[in-house]
Image (cartoon, rainbow, N blue to C red):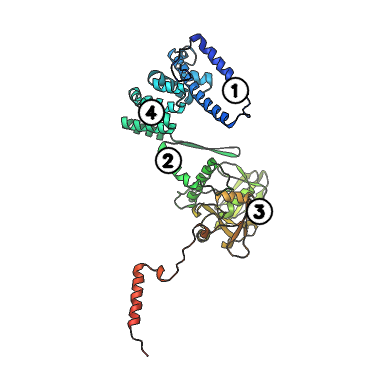
Amino acid sequence: MCSRNGQPSRPTTVDHAPTLAERLHELLSDLAEADLSALSADDHGQLVTLLVRAEHRLHAGVLDAVAAFDSADVASTSPHRTTKQWLQQRTRLSPGAAAHLARTARALRDHLPRTRAALSSGSVSPQHVGAIAGVVTTIGAEHATTAEPVLLDLARRFEPSVVRRATSELFALVDPEGAEKALHNAYEKRGLTLSVVGQHGYLNGVFDVESTEILRAALQPLMTSSGGADTRTATQLRADALLDIAQHSLDTAAQPELGGQRPQLSVVIEADKLQSVTGGAVLPWTGAVVPSAIVRRWSCDAEVAPVLGRLLPPAAGITVRLDGQVGSTEVTGGWLPLQVGRASRLVTTGQVRALRVRDGGCVHPGCARTAAYCHAHHVVHWVDGGPTDIDNLVLLCRHHHRSLHGGLWGLKPDPGRSGRFWAATPDGRYPAQTAADRSPPLRVRSTTDSLPFSAAVAASQRLASAEAVPQQD
């Protein structure tokens, strides 16, 4: 045990330890009921500082108690058998947290007395201690004891990530083969799940550090806010960046084919529903139903295959001809396809290229998303009679495409200038961005300046030769 000044104090007797824990609970109850609203700024700062340090010291007490519990082998006399399982069942810790607590308690008890004392005094955090204690597991107690003074010095001066990086470097120095094996084992534990529950899709993944760096490097450039009106959080920006990468991948020819086609989002919807804002369509992979208004947004830049069909009555026995064969089929209602037309792309490749030259990226004022991560949008929707012409098309990033169809801002043609538009945002009415707003084209002031140096010299020489030739009358 340590006193308030960090110096060793007289150990508490065994009989008093549970009583002290009960008193601690009483003090925490009093603190939870206290009114903190009347504190001054200095008092607030002092309270938070003292409580965080007290939390660190309390964690040291927890580790001491777990270490003593483990030494006494109390768990072996219970149905749980091990300290880790006892902690998991009796304190409701997760399996990982229970294992980490027991492992750290043993490391401090057996090999890291200085680290235990530093945590007891509140000079380092539990995160620092966890990083230092991990050295015992990775490279052995002997190396951990040797490195403890250096790691503790780092812990007192820097955040836990610095200590973790130092332990990784120590691992690679002392046991390079073990460090490489550990990274390989981490890679082998990679996994990704994608599920749908209700109206939400859940993406959960585990990656090794190298894969995580690759993901971070790919996502970070796309996690840019479009200005003060952009209220997306960091997690929302990260999610949008991942979707931008996925959409960009689907839009390129580098994707492998599935059933003769590059993978895309496919949906079947009745023509009347597509023209309406009511109703919905079913997605083929998840079975989720999306409103028709969402499908309208998807269809701004899409391939449309018209299918002529007949609505069948329920439980009707009919005979159909398919590929020259005749047979009876029992149906329970639905659509009978009669004729499938050729898929037509609403926005051509040439038009997309022209939009990239004209708009240069998302036209929303202040948005920095480049053209590679934008969709073509019909200002007047094609199902409402809007033509698929350059003067009715703009580039929008995924975020502003969604918000436009959601009614959060508007886009109207500029009646005085062809191919120019006005954006009506909550902050006001502004001209839509163009490529010139992002990178104004350079204009050469003279003909000579536009030529390479060698060509300019050659031209001046030809001019001089021509002046030297006598003019004929």
Which is more N-terminal, label 2 or label 4?
A: 4
Amino acid bearing label 1: Leu
Q: Answer yes or no: is residue 82 visible.
A: no
Separation of marks 2 and 1 at Cα, in angstroms = 42 Å
Separation of marks 1 and 3 at Cα, in angstroms = 61 Å
Q: Answer yes or no: is residue 91 visible.
A: yes
Kindly identify which residue carries mark 4.
151
Which is more N-terminal, label 4 or label 3?
A: 4
Kindly identify which residue carries mark 1.
31
Amino acid bearing label 2: Glu
Circle 3 — which element?
A: helix
Q: Could you tell whether 197 is left or right of 104 in the image?
A: right
CB-based contact (under 8 Å), mark 3 and mark 4:
no
Q: Position of residue 50 (x, y in %)?
A: 52, 25
Q: Position of residue 392 (x, y in %)?
A: 59, 60
Kindly identify which residue carries mark 2.
213
Which is more N-terminal, label 3 or label 1?
A: 1
Kindly identify which residue carries mark 3.
275
Decide: few, some or many residues near mark 2? Use Cα within 10 Å; few <14, some 14-19, many ≥20: few
